[in-house]
Amino acid sequence: MSAESAESGAGAAQAGADCLFCRIVAGEIPATVVHETPNTVAFRDVDPQAPTHVLIVPRRHVPTVVDLVDASPGELAELVRAVGDVARMEGLDRGYRTVFNTGREAHQSVFHAHVHVLGGRSMTWPPG
């Protein structure tokens, strides 16, 4: 089993009661929801790294964005479409950053696919 598969397996075990984002999607943990679609939920990050910091997650548990595209390219497209919707709603017309942290070395701390939308200030480069 590869390191990536082991991480995905560990993430799959987080589904349901153990997964923070699954619990937010289910309404068990409060969050400031800013946008919803049939397959996605967008909410404000509790530890924002920019004036606007929104997380967008698929409603169903999939550990990483790569797992999401393998399972359902249409759901990934809907996730990215939600990025544009959130950016417009948040007035990020001057620019914003999207971040998919994938794997432990990239500091993915919740193994439920998600994208960060960051904006409201100038972003530096390189990012990490």
Image (spheres, rainbow, N blue to C red):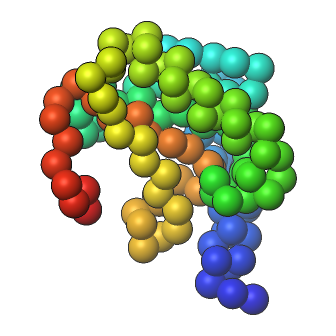
Residue depicted at x 63% and y 73%:
7
User: Position of 35 compared to 58: left or right?
Assistant: left
Q: Tell me, yes or no, if residue 45 can be seen here.
A: no
User: Where 58 sits versus 112, above or below?
Assistant: above
Q: Pick the quarter of the image with the N terminus.
A: bottom right
User: Position of 69 compared to 85: left or right?
Assistant: right
In the rendered image, residue 53, in percent from the top left (x then y), is placed at 34, 31
Q: Quadrant of residue 74?
A: top right
User: Position of 118 compared to 110: left or right?
Assistant: left
In the rendered image, residue 99, in percent from the top left (x then y), is placed at 43, 48
Residue depicted at x 61% and y 49%:
113
Residue that extends furthest to the bottom in the rendered view of this protein = 1
Q: Quadrant of residue 17?
A: top right
Residue depicted at x 42% and y 41%:
98
Looking at the image, which is closer to me, 44 or 31? 44
Q: Pick the quarter of the image with the C terminus.
A: bottom left
User: Where 42 sits versus 22, above or below?
Assistant: above
Residue depicted at x 69% and y 87%:
2
In the rendered image, residue 87, in percent from the top left (x then y), is placed at 42, 21
In the rendered image, residue 22, in percent from the top left (x then y), is placed at 66, 38
